Image: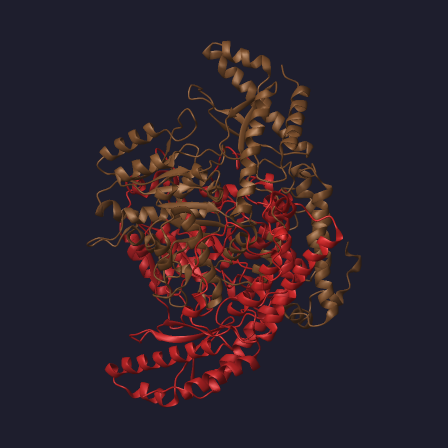
Chain colours: A brown, B red
Amino acid sequence: MDNDKRPIELIATWDTLQRIFIRPEDEASRKTLLKYMEQILFGLHDFLNTHVGVTEEISLKDLTKDFKDTVINKEPEKKLANVITDIIDQIAPKAVNIASPYFVGHMTSALPFFMVHLKTIITALNQNINKLETSKILSVIEKQILAKIHRLIFNKGEKFYRKHVQSVDTSLGAFTAGGTTANLTALWVARNKLFSAHKNFEGVEAEGIAKTMQACSVDRIVILVPKRGHFSLKKAGGVLGIGNKNVIPIGMDKNHRIDLNELEKTIKELSSQNKTRIAAVVGIAGATETGLIDPLSEIAQICKENSIFFHVDAAWGGPVMLSEKHAHLLNGIEQADSVTIDCHKQFYMPMTSGMIYFNDPLAMDQIAYHSNYVNRMGSVDIGIKTLEGSREANSLILDSALKIMGSRGYALIIDHGIKTAKEFAKEIKKRENFQLVLEPELNIVTYRVVPDDFELKLKNAPENKKKEIENLLNDINIKVQRKQREQGKSFVSRTRFKISKKNTTQSVVLRCVIMSPMTNIDILKEILDEQQDIFKRLDID
Amino acid sequence: MDNDKRPIELIATWDTLQRIFIRPEDEASRKTLLKYMEQILFGLHDFLNTHVGVTEEISLKDLTKDFKDTVINKEPEKKLANVITDIIDQIAPKAVNIASPYFVGHMTSALPFFMVHLKTIITALNQNINKLETSKILSVIEKQILAKIHRLIFNKGEKFYRKHVQSVDTSLGAFTAGGTTANLTALWVARNKLFSAHKNFEGVEAEGIAKTMQACSVDRIVILVPKRGHFSLKKAGGVLGIGNKNVIPIGMDKNHRIDLNELEKTIKELSSQNKTRIAAVVGIAGATETGLIDPLSEIAQICKENSIFFHVDAAWGGPVMLSEKHAHLLNGIEQADSVTIDCHKQFYMPMTSGMIYFNDPLAMDQIAYHSNYVNRMGSVDIGIKTLEGSREANSLILDSALKIMGSRGYALIIDHGIKTAKEFAKEIKKRENFQLVLEPELNIVTYRVVPDDFELKLKNAPENKKKEIENLLNDINIKVQRKQREQGKSFVSRTRFKISKKNTTQSVVLRCVIMSPMTNIDILKEILDEQQDIFKRLDID
């Protein structure tokens, strides 16, 4: 690879170094740089095309063996050209071909190719959206797209948005590093709203939880989250000093949505405890494991009656609002106090970008921080009210993507995913040896291998035997999922939850996320065929 | 702009939509996509070249007037080609030319051009480093580069690194969204280490601060931070439930480094309070406002004596360790418990990327979170021990950049910045009407306009008059800085701090960050000339 290693071209002198910071003036250098970009655009693409499968099979031990040197070289080792070739030839084949339509295991898929162009623009401009002085019009565009998505969620009318879209005093939301920090931001605001400043008390953000306990006669803060909530919600409880044990899981009803009775009962119980306060209730719009949507209107109603902050984690499901056909599934979201939506999920943007929105344009005042050198009081700097500091202008990507595709473009993909999920569910029900675990609502399908004779066994077994059979089933499903992953043609993920309220144990479940518009029912049938095949060759006693 | 708006090319049908997800097979489409990339690479570059100045002058009101529409269009509005042209023609001129060598106001500068290529690779691969199943070899490379930088900081010897570089049980650090979340991660670990699990107590992460107060007989948690510390440290105190009032500022000594006496005194006082616990002491390696480095060895010693967690915020100064000439300035950093370094600062990577490192490879166990569908117990998923969830593989950029430039390449830029800062300081001292505020240690210079007659006035004025004169000086410096920013040729930032311990008020200070290797003393002299000129035309009474 390094046969072309002429020291003169390596960046080792002040001259060569300066040159890489200066824009190339001559035609020859431009051509070279463009050639590299061509390699990146299509060299990687060719790999992705020729390797239809998911990734080269290789053990972790083999994978790591060439990556153990830990000394930084003093001298340059490679030219850009070599680095690019190495990545294409050596690295990419050992990465994961998430763009394959056979990769249906996680919330990552092929992107529209223009996303690569848009991200490259962001990189070339390299603005820092944290402050107006390093982003200028990009801050203005960010505020506009925030208002557009806020309107999609909360639909407060033209007058409201005209007032707030470019207001320097209010904030409708923020771009975040991802869904995890979006959820954290929401619960951070919720905590601070609950214990905001009053006489002789500057609020929990300033005073801390210890002091708050005394000042507000409280000894426990809790957050109520559906059992199927993303683990970032539990993490947020830990980070915020609330304690992740106080992120209380609310069980599922028989349809695997939050159990409203249990929610109400829990609120009642906790409210009767004099010194316990509920900082927030969370509803899920597109659960990570199942894609299911909690009854948002009903949760909103319960929260309103009990004056509790209501956060909706729509990291996955948010963009469904762009589909005229399916937007109704998220009814009630407009009553939330805050909403998380991820850009790198169903907005098909590159890793990573998330968003958090607040119903109340003043909510984010709860988390405002100022400094002397940036984000001075009264400035319009967006970074005043975000968890993150310096931040790239990913908002321009979303803005551009919506201009290129329209909401109609996004709706087409979303509708395809939901339709295909329903077809896939039907196919699973038809097949021998497979069991559909949950009827899909969005584009995530959960199912498992259940050999036909097991079904009967399971039905007739006495309670004490059932657990044994379930364990065996789990074992089969883990083996099938692993083997398929190893074969490297397709990838379906797996998770583990209680399939029925009656069950005493969690079941291993296969999980298929239909995100790529190139994933269709024929591909999914192939994936089922392969699983069937693996299962048949398994050595089960 | 939209004269070429043929509906057939807009993405409005299932066919056009599918096509954008599929890699182009024919030569013609490839050529078109490459042409767009050429426009991005050189169209933007041309703008940046022809607009040497910082940005077009335009008021916020004018800037926002075309960005108030808040309805998402149903139909596509533009083709990719139009979006790109619009960004080049309409957006870029109203963005900030942070790549200009005259832009010396913030910690953002020109990047080596290969960074754009490297970021494009990351986007094209679009791996999610959160889990091995969506990143594979990229996770392995991330672990390697983490070990390389850890070694640069802590230098624990070959045996240590051979053990940990690819260990699935330990973590040497993590990539983060930026310095803010890196600092937050460090203090999160520090808080959890202080209140870790013991008999009948599951640790503060699980139990929350309220319960911890009782279980550990504590009523106050504090963090000690130099007054000149970044505001993200205060924010971290707020987020973590410690309370930002309990992030206690330690004053500066006469050299504007942390006052060690005050630090020791404060620790003593707080330790004598039975129910107060110090979660961490922070030292700064390259203060945001001044670039100065705290006496790290001495702080480390004090922390060791008092068994306190020692965090170093080297977001700015970290890469100075790559310079053989200047690495000694950070002596003592190897005794820290944790260290923050930003990639988008002196590693010259695109926005945004930060890193956090821990001396103890088990420290990050304090913040481990698992789930059923990813990051299962015992898995090697990097996302188990990070604040952020899904994350792009920025680590590959750092790895590649170090291969292209070697530590020597980085050292050349760093040495240039420090040398130029010293030249600039000398120049300021020579000039009439300017005062050097602080002798630079790294590449940040603080100074202000002080008309020559003011110097005498200030010296001879009675105490009660001094404040008045200082206010007038502040006013002059704000006006000069604003006017220069408005003129759009150069940009120097400003901040505000007490210049001398004796002062009763904070002074407005001009702040010059010499980050671009294209910024040289001649350019800085021009910037001073312009300020001189603006000042002379000011209407001062």
* Residue A336, percent from left and from top: 36, 43
Q: Residue A21 lies in what quarter of the image?
A: bottom right
Q: Is residue A330 visible?
A: yes
Q: In the rendered image of this protein, does residue B461 appear above or below residue B380?
A: below
* Residue B136, percent from left and from top: 63, 42
* Residue A238, percent from left and from top: 39, 42
**In front of the other: B247 or A166:** A166
- Residue located 59% across and 71% down the image: B48
Q: Residue B212 lies in what quarter of the image?
A: top left
Q: Is residue A77 visible?
A: no
* Residue B106, percent from left and from top: 48, 68
In the picture, measured across the screen, residue A377 lies left or right of residue A420, that is: left
Q: Residue B462 lies in what quarter of the image?
A: bottom left
In the picture, measured across the screen, residue A384 lies left or right of residue B125, that is: left
- Residue located 66% across and 72% down the image: A14
**In front of the other: A417 or B130:** A417
**In front of the other: B297 or B395:** B395
- Residue located 58% across and 44% down the image: B164
Q: In the rendered image of this protein, does residue B532 appear above or below residue B274?
A: below
